[in-house]
Image (spheres, grey):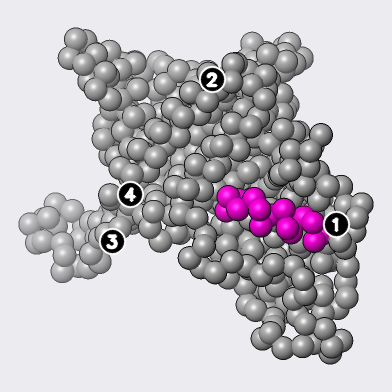
Amino acid sequence: MAEYRTALKLDPDNAEAHQLLGIAYAWKGDINSALESFKKAVELAPDRPDSQMNLGSTYAALGNYDEALFHFRNAVRLDKTHPLYHYQLGSLYEVMGRDKLAEDSFKKALHLYPSYEEDILALAVLYEKQNSLTNAEVNYKKALKIKPGDSVARFRLANLLIKQNKKEDALSLISRGFLISPLSDEGLALSVSYGGSPATSTPPAPPKKSDGKKQNNGKNDFPDTPLPLPENTFPAADKQLESFKKRLQRIPADKTVNIDLEIRLEPKLKPAAITENSVSETDTKSVNPKSLLQASVEAADKESAVKSFSRSFSIRPSGQEERKEFLDRIFRGLNEALENASKDYNVKLSIRGGSAVADSSSLKNNAAASNNKAQYNPYMVGNDMGLWVAGKGWVKYVQEVLPEAESRLKNGGAVDYMLYGLAALTLGEGKEALESFTSAYMEGFAKDDKNIQEVSLLGRGTAYIILGLEDEALKQYEAALSVNPENKIALENKKILTDEE
């Protein structure tokens, strides 16, 4: 920020400096200052589509969708060949309830970039919302084929299968999400949660099915596998982040590393309730009191709205020391941003990372295939010059389905516990995931269902991985192998944790 301000002292009309300063403000949690910087950037360079996208994204983060729509449309008008702009516009249309326009925008993005996994996921969610379940299922499967580590697509598809009473298919799908290796493209993308203050997206603990007494079969509820650790043994959020960084450092330096993160900011102080008495008589002389009251309420709602935005980083193949330096820089900046934002907001961070599905240099030229000039890799968005994106992220996609999944827990189905645990893993909530997988295991043990026991032990192990407790995770994978010695996921995960060849 100091460098950008110095640049602006030397050249006050430098649109790029205003834009980059706005990005810095946004990452420090000062969204209103970011808005002013982006306004100035657009004023100085109205024909730059990325400036329009920055300003629109900030309005979207602030809940001002009408202004966001104006600038997103401008971005698309100025550059019709950029898939991200169509995707962002579609996401905004969907939030505003304009589903047909959203569908059209998502399809335009896919025409420009057929492998745009985030766009395919958004289209699947839209189809599910419209109760077009076949189209939704097809697109969820497409998203998982392109990016097998997308736990959001896996969670949404598994929930869809459960609703259609395809619980065996759902369980198989969930189990494949517990691979922990960051050295392959398969399985669950590693997640971690930062909760510097009360979280806004943490799923509540599922109801417990057992009181610790013996079941009808005369066996103990929970046999030889380790119980969840006591409360005070779980690592703090900063320790989880450090453990997460260290796991990313294990990825060979000749592989591309992708890091996706989403931050949600919830204002700590709620504005006072707006009533007719709050509007002064002088304010109403030239304005209809009801419309003024409505405007005041809307302004208060926007001020208290949860702000969310996401960003992707892509670290190209390099030397091991250079790789470590990049990761240290990213996490140092991330910790600083979280610390600053937590002064005014309750902060929630979800972060995922792993090796790349494909390096950008090896991507097919989709532009040639579609006779367009655009070639786009969505994983490079975070490195795009002066581009900051705020929109509907994966936390929202999970939250939309959580109440439905939670309601089914009242009946205590093991597969529903497994689904709920997968949701917690996706949000980086290892403790909640552990509780849910434990409930699933106890039900599987009570019914002598080896398949449920096996999969829930895999889930417990991956929950411990997210918590940075690898020794405990290894015990769970070994327990899964005691149930089924040929379980490929447990074998692979054990090999990773023990550095076996």
Mark nearest the camera among 1 and 3 is: 1
Range shown magenta: 465-481
The image position of residue 277, as x and y in percent, is 15, 69
Q: Which mark is residue 209?
A: none
Numbered disc 3: secondary structure:
loop
Q: Residues within 10 Å of mark 3 (few under 14, many from 20)?
A: few
Q: Earlier in the sequence, mark 2 or mark 3?
A: 3
* Residue at which label 4 appears: 342
In the rendering, at what x and y percent does residue 232 appear? 48, 65
Q: Which residue is mark 2?
A: 321
Q: Is residue 294 visible?
A: no
- Residue at the disc numbered 1: 481
In whole angstroms, how far apart are the C-alphas of marks 4 and 1? Answer: 43 Å
The residue wearing badge 3 is 270
Q: In the image shown, does 209 or 233 lie closer to the viewer?
A: 233
* Residues at circles 2 and 3 in contact by the CB criterion of under 8 Å: no
| Nearer-N-terminus badge (2/1) | 2
Q: Is residue 42 left or right of residue 132?
A: left
Query: Identity of the amino acid at label 1?
Result: Leu
Question: Which of the two labelled residues, at mark 4 and mark 2, occupies the earlier sequence position?
Answer: 2
Asked if residue 477 is among those painted magenta in the image, a careful observer would answer yes
Report how far apart the C-alphas of labels 2 and 1 lie in the structure. 37 Å
- Say which of 248 and 58 sits in front: 248
Name the residue: 74% across, 76% down. Answer: 222
Q: Mark 1 or 3 closer to N-term? A: 3
